[in-house]
Amino acid sequence: MSAPDNGLPANGNGAPRPVAIAVEQIWKRYGDFEAVKDVNFSVSEGEIFGLLGPNGAGKSTLIRMMTTLIPVTAGKAIVAGHDVSKDPDDVRQAIGVIPQALTSDQDLTLEENLSIYAKLYGVPREQRKKNIDAVLEAVDLTEWRDAQTKTLSGGMRRRLEIARGLVHNPRIFFLDEPTTGLDPVSRIAVWEMLNKLKTTRNLTMLLTTHYMDEADKLCDRIAIVDHGKLVALGTPVELKNSVAGANVVEVHFDRDDEAWPARLEAMEGVTSVQPEGAGFYRVITKSGSKTTMQIVELAASLGETLTSLSVQNTTLDDVFIHYTGRQLRDEQVKPVFTMPPRPGARP
């Protein structure tokens, strides 16, 4: 399948923005196994860039290479102007990494957690308090600075993790599934905070997520990786437009019949049919209204009962299925990657 060909976003005067991350023909091999295969993409300064893919697709390996956790087999990655293979310490100083797991010490206060992290990154004593004050204000946790971390809610702890990753003033932020496990209200609060941080701190962000609505709302551009290869790249709108079919018809029959996929695929305008469970199908079609009428008429002629029927526009879920043949929600939660070592430590 061919992916959309998209360049870097432009700034206000139409010129391309400076590049924050450049991944060039990068490979990662473990013996005969190729985890990442000849991947190329760039992320511009001030962009929120999403990296999506099922478990085993290579996205975690890509992030580990970009954050200096594992060596590059071939090709190169330039992060904040530094080659991750040649200048790992400079890369570590320029980035913040937020893992999926909540790793702040629960018995310490918020300020103590932030202070320890700032010391690890070599932030001078006189600058430490200013940075801590600034990041606590940025994530709206100033009034809890002296509270023990274990007293915070899940959403507040996630905001503390983000503050911790900002305490040394990084230019580029890597976030691994930043809202996993949060309730809907807390998720939206984190989205709003990340958008605010992007603007106020001119941060470049690269994130992974298993929530398609999160990628749709947060990301300026999205890369989909599968089997170690980049299979699609573009804005959310461009990716949705790249999938044949303008609508999705979701239909549920009260009785399952293995003949339904073939019946649905034979309808005029239908480009694909995705079984979603007993009697439930997602039908990608060029005309939602026409396909809906055809389904109702066919069901009536066969004496079948429709339990539900709805029409929606193409979503990123449909894009993901189109390019990988799998749905993110069907995959197990992936292993958590560890924080990068402190500057000066051996990679």
Image: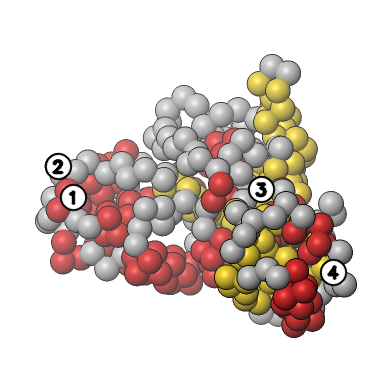
Residue identified by numbered label 3: 326
Q: Residue at x 27, y 55 (%)?
A: 154
Residue under the image location 56 percent in, 47 percent down: 330
* Contact check, label 1 and label 4, Cβ < 8 Å: no
Using the rendered image of the protein, determine whether residue 331 is visible from the camera's viewpoint: yes
Tell me whether circle 1 and circle 3 mark residues in contact (CB < 8 Å).
no
* Label pair 2/3, CB-CB below 8 angstroms: no
Q: Label 3, secondary structure: give it.
A: loop
- Residue hosting label 4: 267
- Categorize mark 4 by other alpha carbons within 10 Å: few (<14), some (14-19), many (20+): some
Q: Closer to the camera: disc 2 or disc 3?
A: 3
Q: Amino acid at mark 2?
A: Asp
Residue visible at 60% across and 54% down in the picture: 278
Asked if the residues shown at circle 2 and circle 4 are in contact, with their CB atoms under 8 angstroms apart, the answer is no
Give the CA separation, mark 1 to mark 3.
38 Å
Q: Which mark is residue 107?
A: 2
Whichever of callouts 2 and 4 sits on the residue coming sooner in the sequence is 2
Residue tagged by mark 1? 149
